[in-house]
Image (spheres, rainbow, N blue to C red):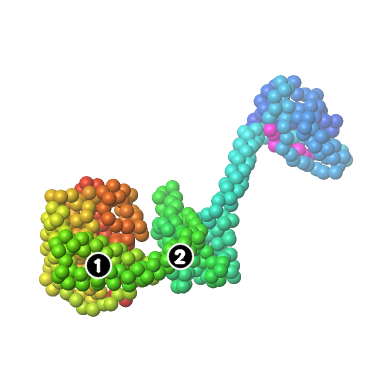
């Protein structure tokens, strides 16, 4: 008997000091006891709860479900149940509770009590609702973003640090279908019907734009063709930017694919037209210049007529140079410039270019100086190298005001011939430098000076230098002059 009393006393102490609300409910559904935690949750005293129907403490919207479970338990259909419900306090306010209920039966199997335990989950529920609302907002925003991305006429791709495809829009899916007719497996470098800008050479795995982006490279206007069928293939201009995590580490890349098929075909048509016109103009121009030279050599012209013939001859020669530039420009965009390499002394080639530029520089009121290393032997196309140096000297003279200075140097550094042309001219802005080698581009300051030219020379120079396996660099400051540096390997590169 004493042991039973001790157990009951222990149970009372446990219930009284438990942080979980506890109660005993009669089979008729009336509350018989309530511990301190339950009274605190419901904001009342135990006396206020005794004899209260449990259903009155349940929110009307949850009452039917709770009543069904309670009745089923009393009828013997189950021994316990659990549900999350809204509880109504005596002051009318509500809280969310996690209720667990189990029966206590007599020796004959009749239900004596239902033991209820209630845990206040109001704060948890609030957080769940906030999380659900936030998730709903994110879901709506994602659907909206995806709709926007699928609307734009640019292919968009996101890859992770391993080069795996994470997401892309509908337009890029169209490009994938064309480039990979057998299906794409979602990783960078997969071979397919992808061709270089020439439309002929297949792009290898290492040069695929996604592979480059996965290596952390950033680039703009990387051009290639996709699709094997010439009638349906597309030209793409691709840009890539790296994505970084919170610690600044490389996490992947975002890429944009613009369809420039119409532009590429227009350029091809333009180049074919320029090449055709240039060829057609060369023959009559050669005839005109030839007859002008015969007139000069005839000796029967007076001074006034000779002066007039000289003007015609000068303009015809200028026109011939322009026609040559147009033809060269069309040829180098169609593929690498053809070079006739031989071992030559660049000192002589560069020196001759300086001598040829001296009269023009002096007439413009400029100083032209040179420092040329002796015996710089290289395997190059001498005529093409001379064309580059002539163009750079001509530009420096053209864009330098009277009293200025143009300086040319030729040295050898690390098995490369280095030709530098520096002037004190008008210079260029950073925006101009970005587009300097673009065909037909002329800076705003050059246009303001009304200097002759159509913006072909530097593009041709770059093509010649690159064709030799070299590179051309430029540094310039507005009103502070410009320096062009050409680096050519002394020997032929594979």
Secondary element under disc 1, as helix, strand or loop, is helix
The answer to whether residue 420 is seen in the rendering is no
Residue 298 on image: x %, y %: 17, 72
As rendered, which of 289 and 197 lies closer to the eye? 289
Residue 100 colored magenta? Answer: yes
Say whether marks 2 and 1 touch (CB < 8 Å): no
Q: Which residue is mark 2?
A: 269
The disc at residue 292 is none
Point out the stretch of residues depicted in magenta. Answer: 96-105
Residue 389 visible, this angle: yes
Q: Number of labelled discs? A: 2
* Label 2 environment density (alpha carbons within 10 Å; few <14, some 14–19, many ≥20): few
Q: Residue at x 14, y 70 (%)?
A: 299
Measured along the vertical axis of the image, is residue 117 above or below residue 479? above
Q: Quadrant of residue 87?
A: top right
Residue 1 rendering spot, x and y as whole percentages? 76, 34
Quadrant of residue 227 in the image?
bottom right
């Amino acid at each position: 008997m004493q042991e039973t009393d001790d157990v009951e006393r222990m149970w009372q102490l446990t219930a009284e000091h438990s942080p979980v609300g506890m109660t005993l409910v009669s089979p008729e559904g009336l509350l018989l006891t309530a511990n301190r935690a339950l009274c605190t949750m419901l904001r009342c005293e135990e006396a206020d709860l005794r004899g209260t129907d449990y259903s009155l403490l349940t929110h009307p919207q949850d009452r039917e479900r709770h009543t069904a479970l309670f009745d089923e338990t009393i009828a013997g259909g189950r021994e316990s149940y659990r549900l999350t419900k809204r509880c109504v306090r005596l002051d009318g306010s509500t809280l969310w509770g996690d209720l667990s209920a189990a029966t206590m039966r007599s020796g004959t199997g009749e239900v004596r009590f239902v033991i209820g335990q209630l845990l206040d989950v109001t704060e948890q529920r609030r957080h769940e609702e906030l999380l659900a609302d936030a998730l709903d907002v994110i879901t709506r925003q994602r659907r909206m973003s995806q709709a926007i991305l699928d609307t734009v006429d640019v292919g968009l791709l996101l890859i992770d640090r391993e080069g795996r495809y994470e997401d892309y829009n509908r337009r890029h899916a169209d490009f994938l279908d064309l480039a990979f007719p057998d299906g794409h497996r979602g990783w960078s470098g997969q071979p397919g019907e992808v061709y270089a800008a020439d439309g002929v050479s297949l792009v290898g795995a290492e040069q695929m734009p996604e592979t480059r982006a996965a290596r952390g490279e950033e680039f703009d206007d990387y051009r290639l063709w996709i699709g094997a069928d010439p009638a349906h293939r597309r030209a793409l201009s691709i840009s890539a930017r790296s994505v970084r995590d919170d610690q600044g580490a490389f996490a992947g890349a975002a890429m944009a694919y613009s369809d420039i098929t119409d532009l590429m075909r227009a350029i091809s048509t333009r180049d074919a037209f320029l090449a055709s016109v240039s060829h057609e103009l060369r023959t009559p121009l050669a005839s005109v210049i030839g007859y002008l030279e015969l007139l000069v050599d005839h000796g029967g012209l007076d001074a006034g007529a000779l002066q007039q013939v000289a003007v015609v001859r000068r303009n015809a020669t200028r026109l011939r140079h322009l026609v040559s530039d147009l033809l060269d420009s069309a040829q180098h965009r169609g593929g690498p410039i053809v070079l006739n390499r031989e071992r030559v002394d660049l000192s002589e080639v560069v020196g001759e270019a300086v001598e040829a530029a001296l009269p023009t520089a002096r007439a413009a009121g400029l100083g032209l100086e040179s420092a040329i290393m002796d015996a710089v032997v290289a395997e190059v196309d001498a005529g093409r190298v001379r064309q580059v140096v002539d163009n750079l000297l001509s530009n420096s003279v053209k864009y330098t005001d009277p009293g200025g200075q143009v300086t040319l140097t030729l040295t050898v550094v690390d098995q490369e011939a280095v030709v530098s042309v520096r002037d004190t001219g008008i210079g260029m802005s950073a925006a101009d430098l970005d587009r300097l080698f673009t065909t037909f581009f002329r800076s705003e300051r050059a246009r303001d000076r009304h200097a002759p030219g159509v913006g072909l020379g530097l593009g041709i120079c770059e093509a010649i230098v690159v064709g030799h396996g070299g590179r051309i660099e430029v540094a310039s400051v507005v009103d502070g002059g410009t320096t062009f540096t050409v680096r050519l390997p002394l020997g032929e590169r594979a």
